């Protein structure tokens, strides 16, 4: 799966458009390949840039970018915004699964087909976190 495809899928219920520069659209063979620190950085930066372009404050943009990167890769935030990311995780869990303590990490999926089993919840949770991030 291409990184651009994955980001489009999980952000589908938000108005956010993330552009992956030509030549940087990684071909990710399996979900376990997502647990790579450079992938975390790339996702966090791409999503934060899209949020800044959409008018988010810097705190909101980087909070949401790091939330999405952690959701995908499992790696914690690079910045000192862990409280923002944890709050967005709780919003995600409540919206996706009815439980603020429940999260999912895409790198733990056994294969890309398994994403289909979770995509509706992931999209719903990401959309709720996006809305909440606006007020950071």
Image: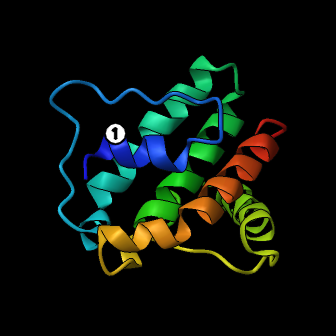
Q: Is residue 85 visible?
A: yes
Q: Position of residue 30 (x, y in %)?
A: 23, 68
74 vs 119, left or right, is left
Instruction: Please state which of residues 29 and 55 is positioned toward the viewer in this rendering.
Output: 29
Position of 47 relative to 71 (above/below): above
- Sort mark 1 into few (<14), some (14-19) or many (20+) by Cα contacts within 10 Å: some
Instruction: Please state which of residues 56 and 4 is positioned toward the viewer in this rendering.
Output: 4
Residue in view at x 54 percent, y 69 percent:
118
18 vs 91, left or right, is left
Q: Position of residue 52 (x, y in %)?
A: 60, 24
Residue in view at x 31 percent, y 46 percent:
3
| Residue carrying label 1 | 4
Position of 21 relative to 111 (above/below): above
Instruction: Please state which of residues 120 and 98 is positioned toward the viewer in this rendering.
Output: 120
Q: Position of residue 87 (x, y in %)?
A: 77, 62
Residue in view at x 73 percent, y 51 percent:
129
Instruction: Please state which of residues 26 and 57 is positioned toward the viewer in this rendering.
Output: 26
Quarter of the image where the C terminus is located: top right
Position of 83 relative to 110 (above/below): above
Label 1: element kind: helix
34 vs 106, left or right, is left
Q: Is residue 75 visible?
A: no
Q: Position of residue 51 (x, y in %)?
A: 60, 29
Residue in view at x 63 percent, y 35 percent:
61
Position of 37 relative to 31 (above/below): above
101 vs 25, left or right, is right
């Amino acid at each position: 799966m291409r990184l651009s495809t994955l980001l489009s899928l999980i952000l589908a219920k938000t108005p956010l458009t993330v552009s992956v520069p030509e030549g940087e659209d990684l071909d990710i063979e399996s979900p376990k390949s997502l647990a790579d620190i450079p992938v975390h950085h790339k996702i966090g930066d791409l999503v934060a840039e899209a949020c800044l372009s959409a008018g988010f404050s810097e705190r909101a943009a980087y909070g949401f970018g790091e939330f999405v990167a952690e959701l995908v890769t499992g790696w914690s935030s690079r910045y000192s915004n862990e409280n923002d990311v944890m709050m967005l995780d709780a919003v995600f869990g409540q919206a996706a699964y009815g439980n603020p303590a429940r999260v999912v990490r895409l790198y733990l999926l056994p294969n890309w087909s398994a994403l289909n089993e979770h995509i509706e919840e992931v999209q719903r949770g990401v959309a709720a976190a996006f809305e909440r991030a606006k007020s950071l």
